[in-house]
Image (spheres, rainbow, N blue to C red):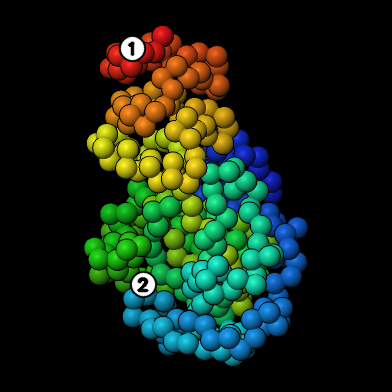
Amino acid sequence: MKNIDEVSNITDQEFYDIYFSKKPVLIKGSVTETSYFKNWSHEYLMNKIGTRPVPVRYISNGIFNDASEIVTLPFNDFIKLSLQEEARSYYLQFTSMEAFFPELLIDLEKPHLMQDSDIPILPALLWIGGAGCVSPLHYDFDENFLVQVRGRKSVKLFSPLDSSYLYPGTSHPFHLSTMNLEEPDRERFPLFNKADPYHCDLNAGDILYIPPRWWHHVKTITPSISINHWFDRFDVLRGKGLEAKTTDEIVDAFQKYLSLGLPIDHRDVLGESLFIKAIQLGYRNVIEAMIRLGANANCVSSRIMPGASALKVADSLQQNDIYALLVANGAF
């Protein structure tokens, strides 16, 4: 089993160029100066939340799949249960801090790799569980920062390229595998032997970045408090399925970001125009959608071909269909 990359510090550009939407990375000690890391002991949370009823998941074997049920417990009682030696049966999972724990929001800070303005800090989701709680093998559709505040978790990960070996279900919104990775039945699931697993230990103060569609299985090793941020940048990237969408579908998808107040001439976190990136990738449908939404067909590249106009970039990269589309829309 291979370890994923570990770094102790990383710049926005390094993260964006090497990892973002590509592969996972463990960022060691990344949040140790935040208010929530300094404050959020189990005792602190009990003092803040008290006996307020909260929804938690229950399943006797600690593997929190679709068979788990929601029960309501006083928060203090739940925390006391989670600190016991045999505490795997109760898990507070992906619980909205904004909806259930608003008094904790004062401590919340964006991880430094989420500082660019198009990523909101909310929703932030809280996870609290005792040793032995398992989130079974699954993948998510969005970028994911898993922030460890207290305790330790063990995480196994698999590339999207291994999906056919992991026996995905067909009816789960988060694409849950039908295998039990705690006790894999290799006779029933022989293709699993072809999968190439990765591993990391997530300790207090660390952030694990998990790209979309990367499979992950997460187990608490010691009583744990975590936050996760699922997010989606307004960006044009290979591997996001944009090339398969119609122009109308892209218009609808981009409207989500425009409704947040972002401009159609948005630039990525490193300053490059999304319009220029779409030209580089040859995504004529994206260019057409952006023009329909009011994008500037005469924008200028800052990184791909610094100082070059959109028309010059299309010409230099021999994107002839896009070049013709730009000319037809007044580019010069």
Query: Which tag, 1 or 2, sits closer to the chain's start?
Result: 2
Residue at 42 percent of width and 73 percent of height: 182
Residue at 41 percent of width and 27 percent of height: 295
Label 2: few (<14), some or many (≥20) within 10 Å? few
Amino acid beneath label 2: Asn
Residue 287 place in picture, x, y as percent: 35, 26
Which residue in the protein does label 1 denote? Answer: 327
For the residues labelled 1 and 2, say whether their Cβ atoms are less than 8 Å apart. no
Identify whether 68 is placed above or below 323: below
* Residue 202 visible in the picture: no
Residue 247 place in picture, x, y as percent: 27, 34
Label 1: few (<14), some or many (≥20) within 10 Å? few
Identify whether 26 is placed above or below 273: below
What is the number of the mark on residue 180? 2
Instruction: Identify the element where label 1 is drawn.
Output: helix
Instruction: Identify the element where label 2 is drawn.
Output: loop
Residue at 30 percent of width and 14 percent of height: 328
Amino acid beneath label 1: Val
- Residue 321 vs residue 27: left or right? left
Identify whether 229 is placed above or below 285: below
Residue 126 place in picture, x, y as percent: 55, 69
